[in-house]
Image (spheres, rainbow, N blue to C red):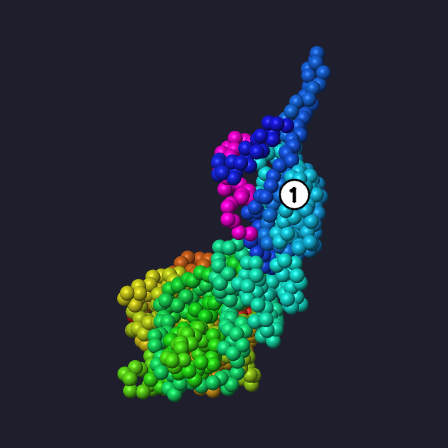
Amino acid sequence: MGFIAMFLISMAVSYLIGQALYNPKGSRKAPGEFNFPTVEEGRLYPVVFGMPERIKDSVIAWWGDLKTVEITEKIDGGLFHSDKKVTVGHKYYAGIHMILCHGVIDGIKQIHIADKIVWPDEEDFEALAADGETAIAFNLPSIFGGEKSEGGIVGDVSILYGTSAQATNAYLVSNLGANISAYRGLVSVILEQIYFGTSGYIKPWEFLVKRTDLLDGGAGQWYVAKADISNDLNPAHILREMYTNTRWGLGHSTLLFDNADWQPFADDLYDEAFGLSALWQGDQTAEEFIMDILRHIHGVIYPDHETGNFIPKLIRDDYILGDLEIFTTSDIVQIEEFSRPSFGIIPDSLYLDYWDPISNKKATIPNYDPAILDIQGKTVPEYAEYLFITKQALAAKVASRERATLSSMAATMTIVAKRTMAHLHPGGVFKLVWPPLGIDLMIIRISSINYGTLQEGLITLACSEDIWATQEAIYSDPQETGWITPIAEPAISPEIVLVELPFYALVVEWGMATVLGFDTALGYLAVAAIQPSQDAFDYELYVRDAPAADLTTEGRFGFTPNATLDAELLKNAVNATIQLNDVYNLEAVDVGSYVLIEDEICKILDVDTALNQIEIARGILDTVPEAHAADTYIFFIGTLVSLVSRQYTVTDTPGIKVLPRTGKGQLAIGDASVQTATAFASRQIRPYPPGNFKINTVSYPASFSGQPTLTWTDRDRLLQTILIEHSEGDIGPEAGTTYTVKVYDEDNNLVRTEAAATSPYVYTEAFERADCGLGGGDPLNTQLRFVLYSVRDGYDSWQQYDLTVPRV
């Protein structure tokens, strides 16, 4: 017993003075690796709000009452000796008093030891104990593997919540005497000579605690009906307590927190399900902690000029434009430091960290703005921590809010004003009219105010354009200051294409199994639009399903990277290097993606952004090479395209309107004309046309002589899950596929249809003379036209080869 006691004492002391420890297997470990709580001079007890991260660094107020029990096993004594027992290990027991946090709390909800949950249910990681539990009888002798491994937990544990009437604990009195503290105002856990395992060290204990219904000290929570938000605490309650608590808060009188102001504030947060959980451990000052809570909820608190009361306000889209005051040159002396973020530095993606209570670790949720990425041509990420958030849905909501704020391109400024604006307050909103900057109307949100002195007669407001009203801003030509607004009026997109998506694109979006389950007549519409001006950053897409139907919004989308052809692109099947003009966002185009040139889809083989050139493979997927004139628009739809979420069937002709948006607002819906799609025609179910079409071994020959021999390669939409180039060999074909060849004479009369042609197919002289009624001495046709396409299950391929070739 003495040896074990000395061992535990030396272990605990080594923990306190920072010496290295050894585990039972002899491998050396540093104290910090065990995370066992330690006593530190001047250490602050944490304050619990809601149900935050688990407390793992409890303060050890006392330890002792040590005991050990031998673990023995019988061994065979042999032929002449009886069986005997040998000691194979020890069970270790100790009494420990841990102080967790300021009291009073609602309850300890879970206890974890060494990453195992041991209470209230060792098999349910999400089970929570009832509030106010004060005693636990552990009987988990095998939770760490039993006597042959690291033992378990057996014994009684008491929980003290630190109420004002709390008496001294009987177990502590029995070990320390009657002259001890009752530990009121602190939450304690007492292990009453508990069996903690077979190792010579105590595994780290962690406690999940909750406080929503009680104030510090044990009084009932203010406005308790709206305090608990799914075990998180209403931020209004956190803020009010931080301001008014006299033990660790700022100590203001509760009379300065009028319910007429604070209860609606709490109601709004409750309705938004905006609960937070925090463990304030003194690593921030009270003022810094308050600002962090306000940052999470996007709110402000300011003192009322007349009453001195503290007034809370959420920054929300909660005002009526017509009710806002207007301030202009009669009130404003000057506007300084007016600026607006420029493209190139605006974050297109936000990665927000929040706290996952199940894993007890940070979790990350992303939020993207593809329109900003499209405009800037590069990824500009932003990272943010909101670790008082414990719900994924709320984290997603805040991530969307923060990313929208970052990408709103809202203007910021400092306004020096007369005292006619001194009645305003932080978080307030007003209308700004400022002719020197050409601002006819802008909605301004106040960040902070320096009210100056009565003698000065001026105040200074730090402001920004309100993110919910950037579309409401109106600009005109500024007064003669030399400054011209760089922001263009929203205008009509100069080119828009509507595409029934091919089978490959649907598979990329939804997967092969899903698409094969689609109705054969079903299709989806994609839209690509060109940026009308350099500062148009996205557009709203309106869709109607039929000519007589109403237009409804489909959401906002980025402009598709695009360009125009510098020269005519001839009809041939070889790879081609193309010079581009009027290039938009070529930097975003990836090698291996695809481009739409009128109705032909081509594969991107190379991109040269310095020379504005691309190399392409012609006529891929369900298309064939066609000729295209110079100045033809091309769309890199494999990079960014707007996908309409509705399904269309054969003969449907949906229509769309594209409404571009700039810093001056969005194009009015009445100013955009309806673009109507070509009738849907079951594109996704149709077989792919054959590939590598040649006449007399030449792709797209300028002429031929003798008997024309047509060759081609098989294609299979089900197997072509990557972009196969036109010149590649046989793939498939898809079951049931046949090929049809049609031949036209020199007068363009159809003279032969071969419904089940095979490659190579020879159009013999005998065929030609018979088909065209030519005698033995008559000259053959001066040219022939050949049409080739695939057929499967009654569907012709989406496109077909159509080539007229002179005979020489």
Q: Is residue 120 left or right of residue 694?
A: right
Amino acid on which disc 1 is placed: Asn
Q: Is residue 157 left or right of residue 760?
A: right
Mark 1 lies on a secondary structure that is loop
The image shows residue 287, relative to residue 201, as above or below, that is below
Residue 484: % across, % down: 31, 82
Q: Nearer the viewer, residue 736 or 782?
A: 736
Residue 680: % across, % down: 52, 75
Residue farthest front in this picture: 179
197 falls in the magenta region: no
Name the chief secondary structure element in magenta: loop
Q: How many marks?
A: 1
Q: Which residues are magenta?
A: 21-45
**Quadrant, the C terminus:** bottom left
Question: Which residue: 41% across, 69% down?
Answer: 372
Question: Which residue: 47% across, 67% down?
Answer: 402
* Location of mark 1 (residue): 179
Q: Nearer the viewer, residue 774 or 74?
A: 74
